[in-house]
Amino acid sequence: METLTVIKAGTGVLTKSADGTLDRAALVHLVAAIAALIDAGHRCLFVSSGAVGSGVSSFGLAEYPKDTATRQACAAVGQARLMQTYSSLFSNFDVTVAQVLLTAADLGTPERAGYVSDTLGRLLSEPRILPIINENDSVAVEELKFGDNDMLSVRVAKLAGADRVILLTSVDGLLDPATNSLIPEVADIDDVFRHVRDDKGRFSMGGMASKLAAVKFAVDAGIETHIAHGRHPERLSGILGGEGGLSTRFVARG
């Protein structure tokens, strides 16, 4: 039985911290790792942030825009750039990308969620097509938002019947604040909220607190979840193979 893995890459993984522009070297590395999983027969859904960050430079901004209209305009430019980049990079591995843009309203009723589920199911039935999902940032205002792409990832994972979620971030996983060492496995998510610290970068939206809220949603839905370092995507195959010490693994409930 094929398993399905949802991989989410945050803005901090995909863009340069200095100016928020797309980090092409990081993207090349990540694309190669995901393509290797597809080659090995894994089914993957990829949730990619970075639309706003990749559009920022077109507007001559030094940091993430605060006002909604500019942020949405950056997303409109950046999403096109982002998909163009992914399409070009994945084509080197004979992988076709499919863009799926969602707002919270798309999963808000069983009927609409069913349409999304059917589309994803059809895309996933093709072995060399990779659905790339992002929030539809150019139109999603606060009341239409998922909160962030961590929550989008786990809600899509539940909808698609995924077996695991891997949240790629800019740290190795959940770190023990006392020792700064990786916590390799968490059996009870409720125990770890005390480890949270505010670590939001200038160009990223979600800190560890939002990640843990998303993790709780996933594990409560019976989906094993990992937090791993997005700058080391070569670890993905080991994580899927059950190797320890490459991420923080959160055990699914039930």
Image: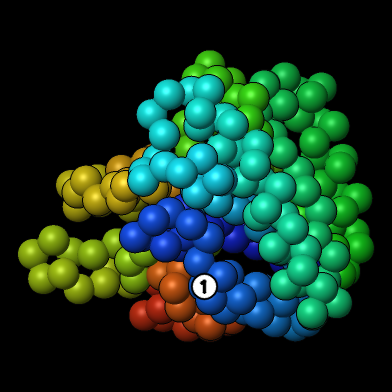
Q: Please tell me whether residue 204 is drawn above or below residue 67 in the rendered image.
A: below
User: Toward the viewer: 139 or 223?
Assistant: 139
Looking at the picture, how far across and down is residue 108, in whole percent?
67, 21
Looking at the picture, how far across and down is residue 142, in whole percent?
50, 20
Name the residue tied to disc 1.
26
Q: Quadrant of residue 45?
A: bottom right
Q: Please tell me whether residue 208 is drawn above or below residue 145 in the rendered image.
A: below
Q: Secondary structure at mark 1?
A: helix
For this orientation, the residue located farthest to the front is 60
Left or right? Give the position of 192 relative to 3. Answer: left
Looking at the picture, how far across and down is residue 140, in whole percent?
60, 25
Q: Residues within 10 Å of mark 1 (few under 14, many from 20)?
A: some
> Which residue is pictured at 8% across the width and 64% down the height?
178
User: Toward the viewer: 33 or 157?
Assistant: 33
Q: Is residue 238 visible?
A: yes
> Which residue is pictured at 13% across the width and 61% down the height?
177
> Which residue is pictured at 76% across the width and 43% down the height?
100
> Which residue is pictured at 52% across the width and 72% down the height?
26
Left or right? Give the position of 253 relative to 101. Answer: left
Q: Is residue 157 visible?
A: no
Looking at the picture, how far across and down is residue 80, in whole percent?
71, 47
Tell me which colouring the rendered structure shows.
Answer: rainbow
Specify the quadrant that holds the N terminus: bottom right
Q: Please tell me whether residue 155 is drawn above or below residue 140 in the rendered image.
A: below
* Amino acid under disc 1: Ala
